[in-house]
Image (tube, rainbow, N blue to C red):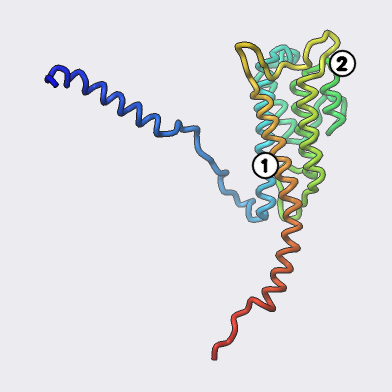
Amino acid sequence: MTKTKTRLLFPLLLGAAALAGCAGSPTPHGEVKGSSASSREMAQSDTNRVATLAMRANLDALYLLMDKLYRRNPGEWKKTTVGREEAEKKVRDAVELRQPWPELQGKRDIAAMALALSPDFKGDRVAAFTHATADMLIVAHGNKIEFYLVDGLDAQHLYNAARNVEIGAWILASRRNAAGAPLLLSDEIGSDVRNLSFEREFGKIVGRLDLMALFVTEKYRRAGISYVQNLLGGSFLQFLPVR
């Protein structure tokens, strides 16, 4: 091989090696991040901590869905007297401070969800649906967002909350208003567009709720097993004297 051909081939080999290296290394997709340590954790059991993290993740998912729904349905936040970001902040503040939402007429929990998803609802449906769904989740968790040693969770209520989210997502995707249009534009499937991000986010909320329901049920079952294991251990798992 001549020196000229070698000089031409060398950059190609380097490029091929670089591409091979890229193919062998997975594309980074972020990393898991834990919450900052807090003195409040001293009053939390492992179950309390998991429930608190799951609740925070579910509320944040609802806020993300609210932002996405506002972007797909700008006419909703325009029903207010403020901009989109300020409208979102008002909803978040009302949820976190456990304040009622005026357009829901004093209704809370599943009654508020039913009103927000009614074809005849005239207010800001994105805000109403987000607030109502968040309120339902908090009610299912004993009207709490953070959990401590004195708090308990009802597994059936968590399970029911998961089904309520599924029902709400289904109604949102299938129900029509009086004009025959969807209540809100969300997922989109077409010949050249496929956006299922709303369905995925709702699915995450449902998955976390179902897992927490199983975790709470397992907690009490495992407590009984641990009690029996301790009894057996006291009798049969002691070291024997050797002198």
Residue that label 2 marks: 120
Q: Nearer the viewer, residue 220 or 54?
A: 220
Q: Residue at x 69, y 40 (%)?
A: 208
Instruction: Report which residue position mark 1 lands on.
Output: 54
- Label 2 Cα neighbours within 10 Å, binned few <14 / some 14-19 / many ≥20: few
Residue 169 horizontal/vertical position (percent): 76, 26
Left or right: 238 in relation to 210: left
| Residue 193 horizontal side relative to residue 126, left or right | left
Q: Position of residue 103 (x, y in %)?
A: 83, 22
Is 31 above or below relative to 51? above
Marking on residue 26: none
Q: Quadrant of residue 98?
A: top right
SS for callout 1: helix
The amino acid type, in three-letter code, at marker 2 is Asp
Residue drawn at x 70%, y 69% as measured from the top left? 229
Distance, label 2 to label 1, CA atoms, is 33 Å
Q: Which quadrant, please, contains the C terminus?
A: bottom right
From the viewer's side, name the closer residue of 183 and 108.
183
Q: Say which amino acid is labelled 1.
A: Ala
In the image, is residue 42 above or below residue 184?
below
